[in-house]
Amino acid sequence: MKTNLLDFDLDGLVAWCQAQGEKKFRAVQLFRWIHHKGVSDFTQMTDLAQSLRNMLQETAEVSFLPVVSRHDSADGTIKWMFDVGQGNAIETVFIPETDRGTLCISSQAGCAVGCPFCSTGAQGFSRNLTTAEILAQLWFAETTLRRELGKDERVISNVVMMGMGEPLQNYAALVPALKTMLDDHGYGMSRRRVTVSTSGVVPMIERLSQDCPVALAVSLHAPDDALRDRLVPLNQKYPLAELLQACRDYLAFAPRDFITFEYCMLDGVNDSDDHARALVDLVRPSRGEPLPCKFNLIPFNPFPASGLLRSPPARVKAFASLLSDAGIVTTIRKTRGDDIAAACGQLAGDIQDRTDVAGRRAKIIPIHA
């Protein structure tokens, strides 16, 4: 079986090449061909020795994922569905803007967290993706878009690990992928332009701050433990006090001087004025230091199994005003790609049901207690 070179960050590829009797600079050349230039055919890597190219053809490959489907939105958003085997599929979304191109990448097939407002979580969990499967999404999207747009320079400037899955529950595969995105010989992205979104895996937030600190977004969705236990079941293991302390600690290493809190607006559930005031008290306590942060309010994207509704626009604006008036930077996310089910919380909602890590169907947790 051939080795998929997408599984390696640069240090890993150097070690693999040295095990084959090759010098470090050859690994750097190879890494640049794959990620910087987007070449998967070893015969086209013209500055590599012929003997090395022959060895690579016999022992290695750059294997990307089979495309199941592609959908193009009226707003320019593109969603690809990739086959990852055994009936599982993942989705990747490209969001073009005037000043940047953002790729939303999946880290798992399904998700084990089971947030009731997310159609991916409602399916349950199948498996973690490999480093190669994470990077294959970026490699394919970048090479495809450059070819279609006729560009030599980078099309994708930002990556957000906000697709299917909880990235920090797939930590071992995630970190080499992040390092490849940041490496100057790879995709050369700024740490500020690579974002990991987490529902609050506290120990892994701490590890990420040491291993590969990038921008951090936290799926908050509630101002207190009682409500968040129902909206984000992981909160039962890592409650808000622990999560917020982990966020404070992360800031010492983060490329940005604030944490982004994602907040899905659910009609009659977490969108009242009292909820907004409680959020202000949470991040700006009367005693103690305020937590540098910004809020990103996300319009809920309904799906039948949720039984939930999107907060009306006027309610979202009023909620945002309460946060802004308290001096907290607050944005309302513009819904992109909802006509192709590529918006937040919609990914892979029509593929199949999955099982969680205990082999049971994911449960929809009632939240109108």
Image (cartoon, rainbow, N blue to C red):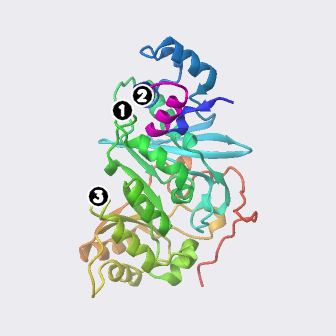
Q: Residue at x 55, y 69 (%)?
A: 309
Q: Could you say whether the residue bearing mark 1 is in a helix, strand or loop? A: loop
The front one of 15 and 194 is: 15
Q: Residue at x 62, y 25 (%)?
A: 59
Magenta part mainly helix, strand or loop?
A: helix
User: What is the quadrant of residue 229 in the picture?
Assistant: bottom right
Give residue 317's mark: none
Q: Residue at x 59, y 31 (%)?
A: 63
Q: Position of residue 316 (x, y in %)?
A: 39, 70
Can the viewer see residue 115?
yes
Residue type for callout 1: Arg
- Sequence-first disc among 1 and 3: 1
Q: Position of residue 198 (x, y in %)?
A: 48, 62
Q: Position of residue 9 (x, y in %)?
A: 47, 39
* In the displayed structure image, the side of residue 62 where residue 222 appears, left or right: left
Q: Is residue 199 above or below residue 109?
A: below
Q: Could you say whether the residue bearing mark 3 is in a helix, strand or loop? A: loop
User: What is the quadrant of residue 28 in the picture?
Assistant: top left
Residue 19 counted in the magenta span = yes
Query: What is the spatial separation of the Cα atoms under label 1 and label 3, in whole angstroms?
Result: 23 Å
Split into 4 quadrants, where in the image is the C terminus? bottom right
Q: Which residue is mark 2?
A: 146
Q: Which residue is mark 3?
A: 256
Residue type for callout 2: Arg
Judged by depth in the image, the label closer to the viewer, 2 or 3, is 3
User: What is the quadrant of residue 170 in the picture?
Assistant: bottom right
Split into 4 quadrants, where in the image is the N terminus? top right
Residue type for callout 3: Arg
Q: Position of residue 180 (x, y in %)?
A: 43, 40
Query: What is the spatial separation of the Cα atoms under label 2 and label 1, in whole angstroms?
Result: 7 Å
Q: Is residue 280 above or below residue 69?
A: below
**Over which residues does the magenta segment extend?**
10-23
